[in-house]
Image: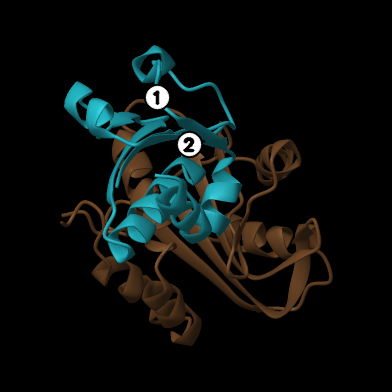
Amino acid sequence: MNNVANFVDVVTAFDIDADSKEEAIKAVITKLDAAGKLLDREKFQADVFAREAELPTYIGFGFGLPHSQSDYVKDATIGIGKLTHPVEWNDGKKADFIFLIAVPYGGKENTHLKILANLSRLLMHDDFRDKLRSTSETEVRELLMASQNPHRSE
Amino acid sequence: MKIVGVTSCPSGVAHTYMAAEALQKAGKEKDIEVHIETQGTSGVDDELTSGQISAADFVVLSTDTSIRGTERFKGKKVVQLTTTQIIEKADALMNKLAKMA
């Protein structure tokens, strides 16, 4: 019931060869746009970078979690980016895995926010991160579907 | 030892919950009773009860955005950290608080 991916689309961008955080985030946004999840790619990108500038989203363990609730998102989507080599995220910290969380504003978004909250909780667990890193691009959505919220399921 | 806390962040979508989970996970591993209220965009979850608050040895509050209802913690020992610090150092924080308790 609390499955992460039930109400959120998942778009993957594996093997990103980027030299900067900006380049890596753009590569994930390109995939989101290609999948039809955005209303305005440039404006969404500006929203993400504005949020990133306000408070960088490095969360530890090599993960960057840029996110934005933006007018320019069509469907709530998690963009998963896997980099071929780590890039500096902020303050010398390096990330090689990106979860870009794109959420539209609007009425029934509560469900989406709950699921994104669940994903955030999941990322705090080593076993989930290990599985993520070893899962292929085609199977990563399934992994998210199968992962229950660790806190709520208690 | 018992700990309560409230987490919140500017977008209220991710760090609020990561910080809460980090504290709960660290507490579980160390056999410390931890209750964390999240104040996110989707609302307040796991709102702390007055019983939980009065029984707590420490209160952990995130500082990214202002926490609602801090008057509930008047007279308690309060530790304030950013959600990023909580996420990265929840284990060390628990160890430190356990020594101070």
Taking the spot 32% from the left edge, 63% from the top edge, the residue there is B30
Residue located at (15% from left, 55% from top): A1
- Give percent across and percent down for residue A53: 76, 40
Mark 2 neighbour density, 10 Å: few (under 14) some (14–19) many (20 or more): many
User: Callout 1, which amino acid?
Assistant: Lys
Q: Which three-letter amino acid code belongs to the residue tagged 2?
A: Pro
Query: At numbered mark 1, what does the secondary structure look like: helix, strand or loop?
Result: loop
Q: Which chain corresponds to the colour cyan? A: B
Where in the figure is residue A41, as x and y percent of width and height? 67, 46
Residue where numbered disc 1 is placed: B76
Question: Could you tell me if residue A42 is visible in this image?
Answer: yes
Q: Is residue B52 left or right of residue A16?
A: left
Coloring scheme used: by chain
* Picture colour for chain A: brown
Single out the residue that lies furthest toward the right.
A19
Residue assigned mark 2: A104
- Quadrant of the image for the C terminus of chain B? top left
Q: Is residue A41 left or right of residue A11?
A: right
Residue A149 or residue B26, whichever sits in front: B26
Q: Residue at x 39, y 46 (%)?
A: B20
- Residue count near mark 1 (Cα–Cα under 10 Å), binned few <14, some 14–19, many ≥20: few
- Front residue (pair A17, B7): B7
